[in-house]
Image: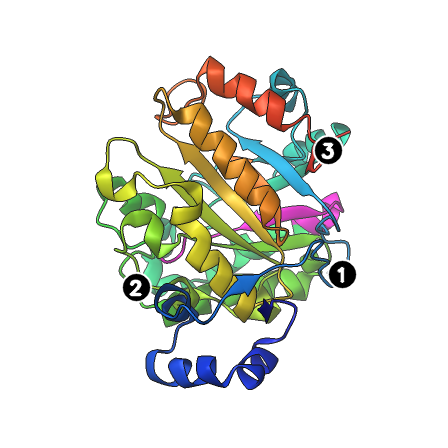
Amino acid sequence: MINVNLSRRDFLRKTGQAALVLGSVGTLDTIFNGCATITFEEQAPVIYPPLDGQKIQPPHNGCYIGFSKWPQPTDIERFGKIAKIYVEQLQAALSKLTFPKDFVEMLYRYRGYPFIYKTMFHSHRYGGFENILNSKEFTKDIERYAKGAVSCGKPFFISTMREMNDNRPVPHYKEMRPWKGKSAKYCIKVWRYIWQIFEDTGANEYATWVWSTIPTASTGGKLPPSNLYYPGDQYVDWIGLSAYSWADKPTMNLSFSGAIKYTYRDMRIRHPDKPMMMCELGRTTNKNQHKWIRDAYEKIKSWPGMKAVIYWYDIRQDPARLTEESINELKKIFKDSYFIGAK
């Protein structure tokens, strides 16, 4: 068995066969998909090294629960627990960036963790995404935002350029994700630039950086490999994945495990010191939704490297809105103390 607590260098040293395969194909996903003699097993609990500063630490045992798109965290009590993580709007910044101090402080009143999960720029403000690093206005906006985080003085999750490897030709994605179609190297350069401004202002004392990617399998194999877009361990605190299952789309009507397991394993081997989270999780509304959800949380519990899971839907309009049967299923799931809510 592969010990996922090994560094990648030790992993390659201890598995000559894996090193040979990597020399020809360059990706661990290929190993897991195509080499039956290489297996993956995690020993529970997975205890990650502590993060520097006042960042949000992963639990030693168990998994934080989170939700998105509710007007108030107290609404989540309908599931028996208040969420530990609550997501701020993800829309692109159409006006000047302002650090959401009220949102952060509200979450701490409920003993939860805020997750700022949004594009930190709107390309039209700065002359297009390809010119963003040459924009003095962009630099000033990010500096002001980072100083707001320092002034607030509370830890928070933050992610920008969500699902960075997503280059699917969906029209409205272009506005939300102006980096689509740009090179992975340039995307990484922008991420590091924003991170460095936070570092220089002292905001990284509190900012817990979550790099978000979509597993290739979850979209029918149509996306570039996630690791091409990874900014580097120095610039990432947690690694986040997204998984949706669409009942009406044959190539995307997948189980939770089928959607993410290869990318999850790849990331655990490549970056064993980085806690994992599900930034987005959802299943379209249908009669089997509650069964899919039950299976997903069972799998998450069996993967102790996964330290947070955020169910994503809008109670008003999202195609993954929960049925009453699914709400009752989540109530049962959250009775398990393994799934950690706010206290």
Q: Position of residue 316 (x, y in %)?
A: 41, 17
Badge 1 crowding class, 10 Å Cα cut-off, few under 14, some 14 to 19, many 20 or more, is: few
Image position of 240 with respect to 5: above or below: above
Q: Which mark is residue 182?
A: 2
Secondary-structure class at tag 1: loop
Placement of the C terminus among the 4 image quadrants: top right
Q: How is the image coloured?
A: rainbow
Q: Position of residue 177 (x, y in %)?
A: 35, 49
Q: Which mark is residue 337?
A: 3
Quadrant hosting residue 14: bottom right
Residues at marks 3 and 2 touching, judged by CB atoms closer than 8 Å: no
At 48% across and 21% down in the image, what residue appears?
326
Q: Which mark is residue 50?
A: 1
Whether residue 99 is visible, yes or no, is: no
Q: Amino acid at mark 2?
A: Lys
At 57% across and 78% down in the image, what residue appears?
11
